[in-house]
Image (cartoon, rainbow, N blue to C red):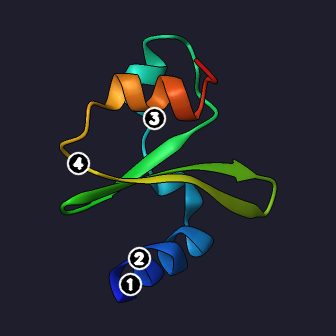
Amino acid sequence: MARVEHVLEGLTETPERGFYPLVLSALGIREYRQVFFKPYRMIYQVMGRHVVVMLISGGRRDMPSLLQRRLLGG
């Protein structure tokens, strides 16, 4: 849990440091960013001065299916 908190603290200071998830970028969706902290990845959205974490997942998960279900409502 301390690692998650450390990543969150870093995002509050520099939320743009994450990159766009390739699966979503390929669809033209650039409202979400992600950072990795092995073996996890955190997908988040920057909303003004706020960072909203949308998903924390194991890095080996089937990301296209997971993102479609969780973020795109599919």
Residue at which label 3 appears: 20
Three-letter residue code for mark 2: Val
Relative image position of residue 21 (x, y in whole percent): 41, 33
Rendered image: mark on residue 59: 4
Three-letter residue code for mark 3: Tyr
Callout 1 touching callout 2 (CB < 8 Å): yes
Relative image position of residue 64 (x, y in whole percent): 36, 23
Instruction: Give 43 or 28, whichever is nearer the viewer.
Output: 43
Lower sequence index among marks 3 and 4: 3
Q: Is residue 22 visible?
A: no
Mark 1, residues whose alpha carbon is within 10 Å: few (<14), some, or many (≥20)? few
Between the residue at mark 4 and the residue at mark 2, the CA separation in whole angstroms equals 14 Å
Rendered image: mark on residue 4: 2
Relative image position of residue 25 (x, y in whole percent): 46, 20
Residue 72, image quadrant: top right
Q: Is residue 42 visible?
A: yes
Mark 4, residues whose alpha carbon is within 10 Å: few (<14), some, or many (≥20)? some
Mark 3 falls on what kind of element? Answer: loop
- The residue located at (38%, 23%) in the rendering is 65
